[in-house]
Image (spheres, coloured by chain):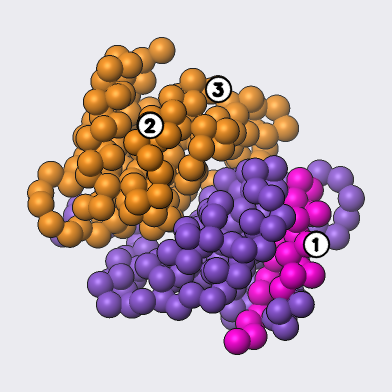
Chain colours: A purple, B orange
Amino acid sequence: MSARIALASDHAATALRSALIAHARASEHVVIDLGPHRVGPVDYPDYGRLLADAVANGQADFGVALCGSGIGISIAVNRHPALRCALVSDPVSAALARAHNDANAIAMGARLIGEDMAKACLDAFLATDFEGGRHAARVAKLSLPFSVKEPA
Amino acid sequence: MSARIALASDHAATALRSALIAHARASEHVVIDLGPHRVGPVDYPDYGRLLADAVANGQADFGVALCGSGIGISIAVNRHPALRCALVSDPVSAALARAHNDANAIAMGARLIGEDMAKACLDAFLATDFEGGRHAARVAKLSLPFSVKEPA
Protein backbone atom coordinates (compact mmCIF):
# COMPACT_ATOMS: atom_id res chain seq x y z
CA MET A 1 0.00 0.00 0.00
CA SER A 2 1.34 3.39 -0.94
CA ALA A 3 1.69 5.89 1.91
CA ARG A 4 2.63 9.56 2.11
CA ILE A 5 5.84 9.71 4.13
CA ALA A 6 7.41 12.91 5.45
CA LEU A 7 11.11 12.85 6.28
CA ALA A 8 13.12 15.39 8.27
CA SER A 9 16.59 15.31 9.76
CA ASP A 10 19.39 17.42 11.11
CA HIS A 11 22.79 17.92 9.44
CA ALA A 12 24.16 14.67 10.91
CA ALA A 13 21.56 12.58 9.09
CA THR A 14 21.24 14.08 5.60
CA ALA A 15 22.91 11.09 3.91
CA LEU A 16 20.63 8.61 5.69
CA ARG A 17 17.63 10.80 4.83
CA SER A 18 18.59 10.71 1.14
CA ALA A 19 18.99 6.94 1.23
CA LEU A 20 15.60 6.45 2.86
CA ILE A 21 13.94 8.84 0.43
CA ALA A 22 15.26 6.79 -2.50
CA HIS A 23 14.18 3.58 -0.78
CA ALA A 24 10.67 4.86 -0.08
CA ARG A 25 10.25 6.14 -3.64
CA ALA A 26 11.43 2.77 -5.00
CA SER A 27 8.60 1.21 -2.95
CA GLU A 28 6.15 3.61 -4.64
CA HIS A 29 5.48 5.68 -1.53
CA VAL A 30 4.90 9.41 -1.85
CA VAL A 31 7.81 11.28 -0.23
CA ILE A 32 7.59 14.71 1.40
CA ASP A 33 11.16 15.86 2.03
CA LEU A 34 11.16 18.48 4.80
CA GLY A 35 14.89 19.02 4.74
CA PRO A 36 17.18 20.53 5.77
CA HIS A 37 17.88 21.74 2.24
CA ARG A 38 20.84 23.89 3.22
CA VAL A 39 24.43 23.07 4.17
CA GLY A 40 25.67 23.46 7.72
CA PRO A 41 24.43 22.83 11.23
CA VAL A 42 20.74 23.03 12.03
CA ASP A 43 18.81 22.39 15.24
CA TYR A 44 16.97 19.07 15.40
CA PRO A 45 14.01 20.54 17.39
CA ASP A 46 13.12 22.77 14.42
CA TYR A 47 12.93 19.85 12.03
CA GLY A 48 11.16 17.64 14.55
CA ARG A 49 8.45 20.27 14.78
CA LEU A 50 8.15 20.57 11.00
CA LEU A 51 7.71 16.80 10.80
CA ALA A 52 5.17 16.68 13.61
CA ASP A 53 3.12 19.43 11.97
CA ALA A 54 3.16 17.64 8.59
CA VAL A 55 1.75 14.46 10.15
CA ALA A 56 -0.65 16.22 12.52
CA ASN A 57 -2.04 18.36 9.70
CA GLY A 58 -2.68 15.32 7.51
CA GLN A 59 -0.12 16.28 4.88
CA ALA A 60 1.64 12.98 5.56
CA ASP A 61 0.47 9.60 6.82
CA PHE A 62 3.75 8.83 8.59
CA GLY A 63 6.91 10.65 9.63
CA VAL A 64 10.56 9.60 9.65
CA ALA A 65 12.74 11.68 11.98
CA LEU A 66 16.53 11.44 11.81
CA CYS A 67 19.42 12.95 13.74
CA GLY A 68 22.81 11.73 14.96
CA SER A 69 21.43 9.45 17.67
CA GLY A 70 17.72 9.78 16.91
CA ILE A 71 17.20 10.81 20.53
CA GLY A 72 16.88 14.57 20.22
CA ILE A 73 14.52 14.58 17.26
CA SER A 74 12.37 11.80 18.77
CA ILE A 75 11.86 13.94 21.88
CA ALA A 76 11.01 16.95 19.69
CA VAL A 77 8.41 15.04 17.67
CA ASN A 78 6.77 13.61 20.79
CA ARG A 79 6.18 17.11 22.14
CA HIS A 80 3.23 17.22 19.73
CA PRO A 81 0.23 15.53 21.40
CA ALA A 82 -0.94 14.04 18.08
CA LEU A 83 2.37 12.38 17.34
CA ARG A 84 3.59 9.02 18.59
CA CYS A 85 7.22 8.69 17.57
CA ALA A 86 9.21 5.52 18.28
CA LEU A 87 13.00 5.65 18.35
CA VAL A 88 13.97 2.33 16.80
CA SER A 89 17.15 0.44 16.01
CA ASP A 90 15.77 -2.83 14.64
CA PRO A 91 12.75 -4.08 12.64
CA VAL A 92 11.20 -5.83 15.65
CA SER A 93 10.78 -2.57 17.54
CA ALA A 94 9.71 -0.79 14.35
CA ALA A 95 6.88 -3.30 13.88
CA LEU A 96 5.91 -3.18 17.58
CA ALA A 97 5.66 0.60 17.31
CA ARG A 98 2.83 0.20 14.82
CA ALA A 99 1.22 -2.94 16.30
CA HIS A 100 1.02 -1.80 19.93
CA ASN A 101 1.49 1.98 19.95
CA ASP A 102 -0.12 3.02 16.64
CA ALA A 103 3.03 5.08 16.11
CA ASN A 104 2.76 7.60 13.30
CA ALA A 105 6.48 8.38 13.22
CA ILE A 106 9.79 6.58 13.71
CA ALA A 107 13.12 8.10 14.64
CA MET A 108 16.54 6.64 13.89
CA GLY A 109 20.11 7.68 14.65
CA ALA A 110 22.35 8.09 11.62
CA ARG A 111 25.50 7.60 13.69
CA LEU A 112 24.18 4.42 15.27
CA ILE A 113 22.27 2.49 12.61
CA GLY A 114 23.46 1.19 9.26
CA GLU A 115 21.70 2.17 6.07
CA ASP A 116 20.32 -1.30 5.29
CA MET A 117 19.08 -1.75 8.85
CA ALA A 118 17.36 1.65 8.65
CA LYS A 119 15.64 0.61 5.43
CA ALA A 120 14.51 -2.64 7.07
CA CYS A 121 13.11 -0.65 10.02
CA LEU A 122 11.16 1.61 7.68
CA ASP A 123 9.81 -1.38 5.75
CA ALA A 124 8.72 -3.17 8.95
CA PHE A 125 7.09 0.01 10.25
CA LEU A 126 5.10 0.58 7.06
CA ALA A 127 4.11 -3.09 6.68
CA THR A 128 2.54 -3.41 10.15
CA ASP A 129 -0.99 -2.47 11.18
CA PHE A 130 -2.14 -1.31 14.61
CA GLU A 131 -3.65 -4.21 16.55
CA GLY A 132 -6.19 -2.08 18.43
CA GLY A 133 -7.97 -4.00 21.19
CA ARG A 134 -6.36 -3.58 24.61
CA HIS A 135 -3.78 -1.24 23.09
CA ALA A 136 -6.32 1.34 21.94
CA ALA A 137 -7.18 2.74 25.39
CA ARG A 138 -3.48 3.10 26.23
CA VAL A 139 -2.76 4.91 22.99
CA ALA A 140 -5.68 7.27 23.67
CA LYS A 141 -4.17 8.15 27.05
CA LEU A 142 -1.03 9.42 25.29
CA SER A 143 -3.01 12.40 24.05
CA LEU A 144 -4.60 13.32 27.39
CA PRO A 145 -3.69 16.64 29.03
CA PHE A 146 -0.75 16.27 31.34
CA SER A 147 -2.81 17.36 34.36
CA VAL A 148 -4.04 13.78 34.84
CA LYS A 149 -1.44 12.40 37.21
CA GLU A 150 -2.70 9.40 39.14
CA PRO A 151 -3.09 5.89 37.73
CA ALA A 152 -6.70 4.78 37.68
CA MET B 1 28.18 10.21 42.60
CA SER B 2 24.96 9.15 44.21
CA ALA B 3 21.77 10.16 42.39
CA ARG B 4 18.08 9.89 43.19
CA ILE B 5 16.58 7.62 40.55
CA ALA B 6 12.86 7.10 40.01
CA LEU B 7 11.75 3.93 38.22
CA ALA B 8 8.35 3.14 36.76
CA SER B 9 7.14 0.41 34.43
CA ASP B 10 4.11 -1.43 33.17
CA HIS B 11 3.27 -5.05 33.89
CA ALA B 12 5.53 -6.31 31.10
CA ALA B 13 8.63 -4.85 32.74
CA THR B 14 8.28 -5.51 36.47
CA ALA B 15 11.10 -8.08 36.52
CA LEU B 16 13.47 -5.72 34.71
CA ARG B 17 12.43 -2.92 37.04
CA SER B 18 13.28 -5.06 40.08
CA ALA B 19 16.66 -5.98 38.60
CA LEU B 20 17.52 -2.34 37.89
CA ILE B 21 16.37 -1.27 41.35
CA ALA B 22 18.75 -3.81 42.94
CA HIS B 23 21.53 -2.70 40.59
CA ALA B 24 21.03 0.99 41.36
CA ARG B 25 20.93 0.36 45.11
CA ALA B 26 24.13 -1.69 44.86
CA SER B 27 25.73 1.39 43.27
CA GLU B 28 24.56 3.45 46.28
CA HIS B 29 21.96 5.43 44.37
CA VAL B 30 18.73 6.42 46.08
CA VAL B 31 15.83 4.56 44.46
CA ILE B 32 12.25 5.82 44.21
CA ASP B 33 10.12 2.89 43.07
CA LEU B 34 6.93 4.23 41.47
CA GLY B 35 5.51 0.83 40.68
CA PRO B 36 3.24 -0.71 39.64
CA HIS B 37 2.93 -2.39 43.02
CA ARG B 38 -0.08 -4.47 42.08
CA VAL B 39 -0.47 -7.60 39.97
CA GLY B 40 -2.14 -7.50 36.56
CA PRO B 41 -2.20 -5.26 33.52
CA VAL B 42 -1.68 -1.52 33.87
CA ASP B 43 -1.50 1.27 31.30
CA TYR B 44 2.01 2.55 30.53
CA PRO B 45 0.85 6.18 30.04
CA ASP B 46 -0.18 6.34 33.71
CA TYR B 47 3.24 5.25 34.93
CA GLY B 48 5.03 7.42 32.41
CA ARG B 49 3.20 10.42 33.84
CA LEU B 50 4.04 9.45 37.42
CA LEU B 51 7.69 9.22 36.44
CA ALA B 52 7.67 12.52 34.57
CA ASP B 53 6.09 14.27 37.54
CA ALA B 54 8.67 12.82 39.95
CA VAL B 55 11.54 14.18 37.86
CA ALA B 56 9.86 17.48 36.99
CA ASN B 57 8.99 18.13 40.64
CA GLY B 58 12.58 17.52 41.75
CA GLN B 59 11.76 14.40 43.73
CA ALA B 60 14.21 12.49 41.53
CA ASP B 61 17.29 13.50 39.55
CA PHE B 62 16.69 10.95 36.80
CA GLY B 63 13.93 8.64 35.63
CA VAL B 64 13.99 5.10 34.25
CA ALA B 65 10.87 4.18 32.26
CA LEU B 66 10.20 0.58 31.28
CA CYS B 67 7.54 -1.21 29.27
CA GLY B 68 7.50 -4.14 26.83
CA SER B 69 9.20 -2.28 23.98
CA GLY B 70 10.04 0.96 25.81
CA ILE B 71 8.22 2.82 23.04
CA GLY B 72 4.90 3.58 24.69
CA ILE B 73 6.29 4.76 28.00
CA SER B 74 8.99 6.86 26.28
CA ILE B 75 6.27 8.71 24.36
CA ALA B 76 4.29 9.20 27.57
CA VAL B 77 7.28 10.64 29.47
CA ASN B 78 8.15 13.01 26.62
CA ARG B 79 4.67 14.55 26.76
CA HIS B 80 5.97 16.47 29.78
CA PRO B 81 7.83 19.58 28.52
CA ALA B 82 10.42 19.31 31.32
CA LEU B 83 11.36 15.73 30.51
CA ARG B 84 13.81 14.52 27.91
CA CYS B 85 13.49 10.76 27.71
CA ALA B 86 15.75 8.67 25.47
CA LEU B 87 14.66 5.21 24.40
CA VAL B 88 17.93 3.28 24.40
CA SER B 89 19.11 -0.23 23.59
CA ASP B 90 22.86 0.09 24.11
CA PRO B 91 25.33 2.03 26.30
CA VAL B 92 26.51 4.24 23.41
CA SER B 93 23.08 5.75 22.94
CA ALA B 94 22.55 5.93 26.71
CA ALA B 95 25.73 8.02 27.06
CA LEU B 96 24.85 10.21 24.04
CA ALA B 97 21.47 10.90 25.62
CA ARG B 98 23.22 12.62 28.51
CA ALA B 99 26.14 14.15 26.57
CA HIS B 100 24.15 15.74 23.73
CA ASN B 101 20.51 15.89 24.87
CA ASP B 102 20.86 16.40 28.65
CA ALA B 103 18.30 13.61 28.96
CA ASN B 104 16.80 13.28 32.42
CA ALA B 105 15.17 9.93 31.72
CA ILE B 106 15.87 6.75 29.78
CA ALA B 107 13.38 4.20 28.53
CA MET B 108 14.07 0.56 27.78
CA GLY B 109 12.01 -2.34 26.47
CA ALA B 110 11.90 -5.38 28.73
CA ARG B 111 11.00 -7.69 25.84
CA LEU B 112 13.86 -6.39 23.69
CA ILE B 113 16.86 -5.81 25.94
CA GLY B 114 18.70 -8.26 28.19
CA GLU B 115 19.10 -7.56 31.87
CA ASP B 116 22.88 -7.08 31.79
CA MET B 117 22.62 -4.76 28.78
CA ALA B 118 19.95 -2.73 30.56
CA LYS B 119 22.24 -2.38 33.59
CA ALA B 120 25.08 -1.26 31.33
CA CYS B 121 22.77 1.33 29.73
CA LEU B 122 21.80 2.70 33.13
CA ASP B 123 25.44 2.84 34.24
CA ALA B 124 26.50 4.67 31.05
CA PHE B 125 23.61 7.10 31.38
CA LEU B 126 24.43 7.95 35.00
CA ALA B 127 28.19 8.19 34.37
CA THR B 128 27.93 10.77 31.57
CA ASP B 129 27.66 14.54 31.93
CA PHE B 130 25.93 16.95 29.56
CA GLU B 131 28.47 18.58 27.25
CA GLY B 132 26.62 21.89 26.98
CA GLY B 133 28.08 24.19 24.32
CA ARG B 134 26.36 23.92 20.95
CA HIS B 135 23.96 21.36 22.41
CA ALA B 136 22.50 23.72 25.01
CA ALA B 137 20.46 25.88 22.61
CA ARG B 138 18.99 22.79 20.97
CA VAL B 139 18.02 21.29 24.30
CA ALA B 140 16.37 24.59 25.29
CA LYS B 141 14.24 24.46 22.13
CA LEU B 142 12.77 21.14 23.28
CA SER B 143 10.86 22.99 25.97
CA LEU B 144 9.47 25.75 23.72
CA PRO B 145 5.73 25.95 23.13
CA PHE B 146 4.69 23.97 20.09
CA SER B 147 3.39 27.09 18.31
CA VAL B 148 6.90 27.84 17.03
CA LYS B 149 6.86 26.04 13.71
CA GLU B 150 9.45 27.42 11.33
CA PRO B 151 13.19 26.75 11.51
CA ALA B 152 15.19 29.91 12.19
The residue carrying mark 3 is B129
Locate residue A8: give its quadrant. bottom right
Q: Is residue B5 left or right of residue A88?
A: left
Specify whether residue A116 is painted magenta.
no
Q: Which mark is residue A18?
A: 1
Residue B54 versus residue B87 in the image, above or below? above
Specify whether residue A4 is painted magenta.
yes
Q: Is residue A48 left or right of residue B38?
A: right
Q: What segment is highlighted magenta in the picture?
A: A1-24
Residue A122 versus residue B4 in the image, above or below? below
> Label 1 lies in what chain?
A
Residue located 59% across and 62% down the image: A121
Which x, y percent locates residue A9? 72, 56
Secondary structure beneath disc 2?
A: helix
> Label 2 lies in what chain?
B
> Label 3 lies in what chain?
B
Q: Tag 1: Cα neighbours inside 10 Å, few (<14), some, or many (≥20)?
A: some
Q: Say which amino acid is labelled 3.
A: Asp
The residue carrying mark 2 is B116
Which x, y percent locates residue B132? 64, 27
